[in-house]
Image: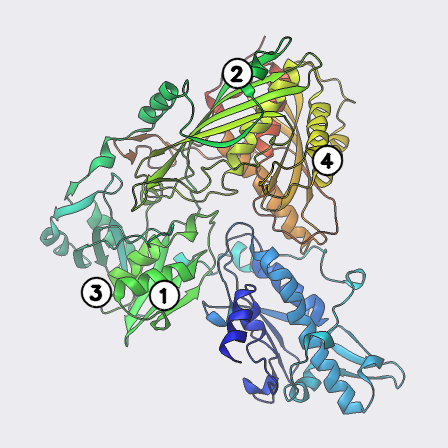
Amino acid sequence: MDRRRFLQLTATGALVLGFYIRSGPRATAAAVASEAVFAPNAFVRITSDGRVTIVSKMPEMGQGIKTSLPMVIAEQLDVNWKDVTIEQGDLDPKYGSQMAVGSRSTPTNYETFLRVGAVARTMLVQAAAQTWGVPAGELTTAGGTVRHATSNRSLTYGQLAAKAATLLVPAENAVTLKDPKDYKLLGTRVTGIDNPQVVTGKPLFGIDVRLPGMLYAVYQKCPAWRGKPVSANLDLIKALPGVKDAFIVESIPSVEGGQLEGLKPGVAIVADSTWAAFSARKQLRVTWDEGKVAETSWDGFVAKAKELSVRPGERVVRKDGDVDTAFRQSGAKVVEAQYVYPMISHLALEPMNATAHWHDGVMEMWVPSQGPAGGQGLISTLLKIPTAKIKVHLTRMGGGWGRRSKPDFMLEAAAIAHRVNAPVKLTWSREDDLAHDTMRPGGLHFLKGAVDSRGQLLAWKNNFFSFGNAGANGQVAAAPGAALTPDEFPARAVANFLTEQTTFATGWPMGHWRAPGACVFAWVIQSFIDELAHAGGQDPLAFRLSLLDAMATAPLAEGRRDAEFQVDRMRAVLQAAAEKVGWGKTKYEKGRGVGLAFHLSHGGYFAQAAEVTVSRDGKVKVDRVVSVGDVGKQIVNLSGAENQVEGCIVDALGTMMFQELNIANGRVVNLNLDEYPMIRMPDAPAKIEVHWIRTNNAVMGIGEPALPPAAPAICNAIFAATGKRIREFPASRADLRWA
């Protein structure tokens, strides 16, 4: 392969490098395998005894990707799922990208993985054709067997492995994919490959790693973000029972121009047990230089936003028509509202952890990471060694939602292990996790809208205040998920439209949180749309459909390339959700209500309808949520897909009702679950219905797009039940009592 071809292949997709690893005019499967093993690419191995192994390259955090992506290969390979062994791949360039974020694992790998399986099947068929001396077109496959109907002969894949390993990898035009109508595996319910180990407590997760001679570490960072240690009582700590070492770790900076945070300074304690390390930490006394961030607080930023809200925002995101003139139009009914949501934590069940071992010039690591390559690159900078000398084993993660795409815990473990002559496991406490999470940014939206005398949307204005950090050039960049885009709905659906944004520099650690941006923007937008529908005397469903109709006929402004929003797909899921919940067919008594919402996120079109009951004393119970999604032409694993939607809805309800980080003096104040409540089983919806509309569009992920519509659908239902509008999260603050 020449340099140009290498660049073409590696730049076109996540799996291309692995797929073409032996490409070329004389490439054969035997180039990397003995004749007893058929390994046509980096992901499939078939041995002569019939064992089929499929490598799952993506990190698994409960989203089911370790099961679903191998299913794609197995379908095209035409093997029985029960005969397949799934092997978790370590971080390796031959697999291509191994970053599991943004619901991108399925859409970036699906089509290529179809071909991965089809290439292997094609070569096995060719091996059988040569063995029998018959045309390959006369042969069929099923259940790991090649059959020749005319002569009633068959050979298993195991019997063909040695022969297939000698063949050239076929050209693309020689490989035919199975017709989706013939799929036997995709679209069925398949239990997660790790489920038996998870429910029986077998070691799978990063926190389960055990190595001979392993030591245990904790890492104390400044409670105020961006602070650094000046001195510590290290001599006392080193003298405590079980403690092996204690030392101050200096920082390394963030990646220039990127979002990956560097190593934060702190104090490391290494001991012969987790208990000894945690116990010693209680006696650690550090003098900190807390820096300027210690002067900041959530209340201070809220007050500043309210003060500035009467002025134009610092940046115009989009402007169509003239909102001020529209608001003054005769007969216009104007509605104003302020929507506020706080900073919240990811709070994965498994706290951040990593195990590292510095030996023979190699940093070997075992990490539960969504973005292991980013961590590997920063460790290379930290230790001044090539990435090839940093070996990363991927463990299962006990939750992620974007938090584990940040490599801070990897860097800390590597920095500590580099000074210790033994494997070291670093474990964060729950307090560490809350104090040093990369939070979902909070925000304040000052909204103003108007409907005309017919109840149609006339004007829309959103003055948005959120948070970011100053870059090297001094400019403030919005945190991930904290930037409105020009095509944010209902753009193009209303002639007079204005969105403005002001971004405060904070120094706070913020990052991607499940369905970044959409997770809160959907609540704000779909709730305010509901307000305007009621102000105009319109049915909320009909009002939304009229906006979609307006969007379908509105041309793009000159020079603008708004993100694609397929109105027909959104209309279909919205109408289906309304139909399945029985919209307009049920008369609810006081205290019960139904609400609707929709949102496009990460390529997935979702609409949801919620039925709620609110008791007279203001307690909310979500009785039922109906979800309808369109994620393209194929649901890979129906069981996993339903699980993701159910998880999204429960997660959305929990963050809506309970979660809130109290930030004062540049730090998180509420540092454990007694002060940071999470959703519990009695709070979850009594019933969740999951429905799909299949369209002839690219296959998309599901782990995020089902979350955004849930909170607004529930809040709109609460309004229908009580006449009270929730405009601030957490909703537990609201007085929902009614008489």
Amino acid type at mark 4 = Arg
Q: Earlier in the sequence, mark 4 or mark 1?
A: 1
Instruction: Using the numbered discs, state the Cα–Cα distance from disc 1 to disc 2 in whole angstroms.
Output: 53 Å
Under tag 2, what secondary structure?
A: strand
Q: Amino acid at mark 2?
A: Glu
- The dot on residue 419 is 3
263 vs 369, nearest the viewer: 263
- Of labels 1 and 2, earlier in sequence is 2
Alpha-carbon distance for marks 4 and 1? 48 Å
Image: 681 above or below 702 = above
Q: Which residue lies under the disc numbered 4?
A: 571
Q: Earlier in the sequence, mark 4 or mark 3?
A: 3
**Kind of residue indicated by mark 3:** Arg
- The residues bearing labels 4 and 3 have C-alpha atoms spaced at a distance of 59 Å
Tell me if label 4 and label 1 are in contact, CB under 8 Å.
no
Observer-side mark, 1 or 2, equals: 2
Q: Measuring 25% from the left and 40% from the top, which residue is drawn there?
A: 223
> In the depicted view, which residue is nearer to us: 467 or 132?
467
Residue named by callout 1: 365
Residue with the mark numbered 2: 336
Whether residue 211 is visible here, answered yes or no, is no
Q: Position of residue 71 (x, y in %)?
A: 65, 63
Residue 277 horizontal side relative to residue 366, left or right: left
| Percent x, y of residue 521 | 53, 33
Crowd tier of the residue under label 3, counting other residues whose Cα lies within 10 Å: few below 14, some 14–19, many 20 or above? few
Residue at 59%, 8% (x, y): give it: 739
